[in-house]
Image (spheres, rainbow, N blue to C red):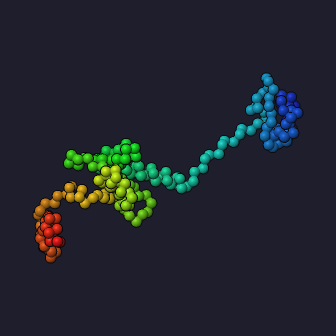
Amino acid sequence: MTCPLKWQQACRNLDIACHRCRAEIGEGELAYLPLAGSPSIKSHPAYEKPPPPPRKQTNTASQQTNTASKIGRATERRVLRDLGARATVASGAIFGDGDGSIVIDGETWRIEHKTRVARRNTLGPTEDEWATAQAQGCRLFITTHNNRSVVTMDITDLKSLVVLPPEFTEGVNEEAGGPAHSSDAEVAGQLE
């Protein structure tokens, strides 16, 4: 390939870079530099539009992390909505107040939620997660895996919520061969 004479006469690099110009040798970069009033480089017959910059490749691990994060946020919103709970600002990241809160018997209970995406042996919170939730004042810890949610709470909180009627508990231990008692005080007295 030889650069047409019309284009050679309009190029500032005629004597300087013609020997390495794509228009002259068929490869490399186009060294055409137009003189004032000459046609632009984009109209040169050897001009090729530069290829677009390569797209940033994301590795599979980061895609999975983003996917897990999105699944976790969506699951947290769904669980809190189903409970009728109010979500906290930035899911508790700013003020350290848990992921949500719900009012039970006029008292506000903070909620911490975790979504298990990967297979794990535990459905409840780990010791570190439980300690963090307790430090944030959370009384309910909800763990969700495969659309099944488990609530973890301190036994004293459970007792404050659950009041079983006497007819439900009386006679249960007698049928099993144990003493008939219905209160923790009686149990504590028998164990001493």
The answer to whether residue 34 is seen in the rendering is yes
Q: Is residue 152 left or right of residue 174?
A: right
Q: Residue at x 14, y 71 (%)?
A: 190
The answer to whether residue 4 is seen in the rendering is no
* Percent position of residue 110, x then y: 30, 49
Q: Residue at x 13, y 60 (%)?
A: 165
Q: Which residue is farthest front?
A: 192
Q: Nearer the viewer, residue 50 or 80?
A: 80
Q: Is residue 14 above or below residue 166?
A: above
Q: Which residue is farthest bottom?
A: 177
Q: Residue at x 84, y 32 (%)?
A: 13
- Quadrant assignment for the C terminus: bottom left
Q: Is residue 35 above or below residue 135?
A: above
Q: Nearer the viewer, residue 110 or 30?
A: 110
Q: Residue at x 20, y 48 (%)?
A: 105
Q: Is residue 95 left or right of residue 24?
A: left
Q: Is residue 178 above or below residue 72?
A: below
* Percent position of residue 58, x then y: 57, 51
* Percent position of residue 99, x then y: 35, 48
Q: Is residue 165 left or right of residue 88?
A: left
Q: Nearer the viewer, residue 104 or 52?
A: 104
- Quadrant assignment for the N terminus: top right
- The total number of labels drawn is 0
* Percent position of residue 158, x then y: 23, 58
Quadrant housing residue 127: bottom left
